[in-house]
């Protein structure tokens, strides 16, 4: 009988030790799991941030290209309209006013000069579009474009006319030239302002939808 009691006690002791070992293993696993979950959460957040960053960069570059395209198209289109209006004598000023101070030679007479002028105005218009993007992209409606076009007209014909483009004083041109150029610059400013504002609002809607 005493031997059986000792064996039972040994067996119980072994069982208790096994239970303690199992409990210690479970506690270690429970301690490791939160750390693993935390690491996994950090990794997933890093991946999401990288994906969002790449998408924001691609959207930013796409928006940059869109503003540049708006500016170039606006400059080329409305300078072409100016060429047509000057051809029909609605205005004494054509798109080649930007080359008045640049001597291109005899090879650049006529149509070649007009093409170079239109292309040059397209390049200048890219900078104009970015200027409006930085100062007025949050505006909406037609009025900002009207004021922007009028401001450009004043800068071109009043402020920089004689200095940069060798233009005469505005009083020396006919009233048809004055009215036609004002209307044309208003249309140009409205086109640039409305298109740039629309592109900015579209970008905001995209970023708002992505954040949700």
Image (cartoon, rainbow, N blue to C red):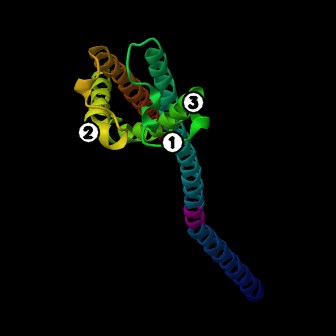
Q: What element does badge 2 sit on?
A: helix
Residue receiving disc 3:
115
Instruction: State the image coordinates of residue 84 (x, y, percent, origin top left).
Output: 49, 16
Q: What element does badge 3 sit on?
A: helix
The span picked out in magenta is 33-39
Residue 143 in the figure: left or right of residue 41: left
Instruction: State the image coordinates of residue 75 (x, y, percent, origin top left).
Output: 47, 30
Kindly identify the residue that appears in the image at 29 percent across and 23 percent down: 146
Using the image, determine if residue 12 lies above or below residue 48.
below
Residue receiving disc 2:
159
Using the image, determine if residue 126 lies above or below residue 41.
above
Question: Which of disc 1 and disc 3 is earlier in sequence?
Answer: 1
Residue furthest left in the image? 171
Quadrant in which residue 9 is drawn: bottom right
State how far apart marks 3 and 1 are (Cα).
26 Å
Q: Which of the numbered marks, if any, corresponds to residue 64?
A: 1
Instruction: State the image coordinates of residue 64 (x, y, percent, origin top left).
Output: 51, 42
Kindly identify the residue that appears in the image at 56 percent across and 58 percent down: 46
């Amino acid at each position: 009988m005493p031997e059986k009691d000792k064996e039972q006690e040994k067996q119980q002791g072994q069982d208790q030790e096994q239970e303690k070992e199992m409990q210690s293993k479970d506690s270690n696993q429970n301690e490791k799991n939160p750390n693993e979950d935390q690491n996994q959460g950090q990794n997933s957040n890093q991946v999401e941030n990288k994906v969002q960053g790449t998408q924001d960069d691609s959207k930013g570059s796409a928006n940059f290209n869109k503003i540049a395209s708006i500016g170039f198209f606006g400059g080329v289109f409305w300078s072409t309209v100016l060429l047509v209006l000057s051809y029909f004598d609605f205005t004494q000023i054509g798109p080649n006013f930007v080359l008045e101070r640049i001597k291109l030679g005899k090879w650049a007479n006529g149509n070649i000069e007009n093409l170079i002028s239109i292309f040059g105005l397209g390049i200048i218009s890219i900078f104009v579009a970015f200027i409006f993007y930085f100062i007025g992209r949050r505006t909406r409606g037609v009025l900002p474009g009207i004021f922007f076009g009028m401001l450009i007209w004043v800068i071109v014909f009043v402020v920089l006319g004689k200095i940069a483009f060798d233009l005469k004083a505005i009083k020396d041109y006919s009233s048809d030239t004055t009215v036609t150029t004002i209307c044309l610059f208003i249309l140009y400013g409205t086109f640039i302002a409305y298109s740039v504002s629309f592109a900015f609002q579209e970008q905001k809607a995209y970023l708002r939808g992505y954040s949700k």
